[in-house]
Amino acid sequence: MGKNFIPAGIAKFTEYIKIAFKKAKDNLTVYEIAPEKLAPVETAYNRYIAAEALATDPDTATTGHRRERNIAKKELDPLWRGFLNANIRYNELVPAADLEVFGIKSRDDTRTPASVPDAIPMVSIERVGAYRFEAHVLDSATGKSKNPLYATGSYLYVAITDLDKEPEHEDDFRKRDFSSNNKHVLEFHMAQKGKQANIYARYSNPHGKEGPQGPTEVVIIN
């Protein structure tokens, strides 16, 4: 996995995180990222910004406030990096200019492109709670969750329809988050109770290029 070029020093990190976090929050819909993916980061971010303000203000700067600022940064840093790696780095909806804002090296289209996986995935779905499912993406040739040749993980596509009704258009399917271990968690809402979730998967290479669509599986939301 590539590195995120995030400043280490407090002053530059603070300047960076304010801009990058706002970019992410303002564009969740554009990037098709569920708001709950950013929620843990936002809590840590707010804690850090508040602590940093106290630690840098001459009227409030104390050893205790600087210690709190450093603790808050240590909490925020891995959460933020994890969010970038899971939701931004391989997200084709994120423009190259935005990747630079996030401190991610732009995709280099001049290099020999990585091969696209040609394995066909299948989805095994297990109910784990009310309106909650785990979907495991398996290589149809081996029946295993291990990534096949050229794949670094998988995406799920989900369309919600009335019971016993197939999606009418490909646009009805919404792309879900990338998973490097091919395990996805699907959470639905009470308002969707009794409806049908139509689900298929695609393997993806390191540059976000996806292989063929697997067969569609169906579960009833309840």
Image (cartoon, grey):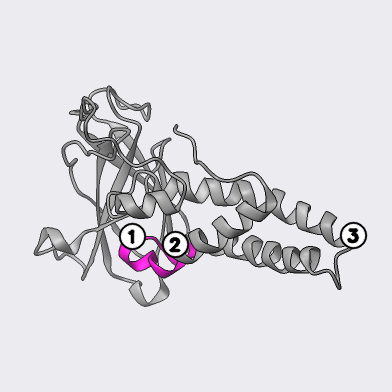
* Quarter of the image with the C terminus in it: bottom left
What residue appears at the point 69 percent right and 61 percent down from the top-left corner? Answer: 48
Q: Which residue is mark 2?
A: 24
Please tell me whether the stretch drawn in magenta is mainly helix, strand or loop: helix
Amino acid type shown at disc 2: Ala
203 versus 49 height, above or below? above
Q: Seen in the image, is 142 located left or right of residue 126?
A: left
Question: Which of pointers 1 and 3 lies earlier in the amino acid sequence?
Answer: 1
Res 64 label: 3
What residue appears at the point 21 percent right and 68 percent down from the top-left corner? Answer: 163
Residue 46 screen position, x and y as percent: 65, 67
Q: CA distance from mark 1 to mark 3?
A: 39 Å
Residue 153: image quadrant is top left
Amino acid type shown at disc 3: Gly
Q: Is residue 185 among the parts visible in the rendering?
A: no
Q: Classify mark 2: helix, strand or loop.
A: helix
Q: Residue furthest right?
A: 63
Residue 45 screen position, x and y as percent: 63, 62
Res 49 label: none
Residue 102 screen position, x and y as percent: 45, 51
Question: Which of pointers 1 and 2 lies earlier in the amino acid sequence?
Answer: 2
27 versus 102 height, above or below? below
Res 31 label: 1
Q: Residue furthest bottom?
A: 191
Q: CA distance from mark 1 to mark 2?
A: 9 Å
Q: Nearer the viewer, mark 1 or mark 2?
A: 2
Contact between labelled residues 2 and 1, with CB atoms less than 8 Å apart: yes
Q: CA distance from mark 2 to mark 3?
A: 31 Å
- Residue extent of the magenta highlight: 25-36
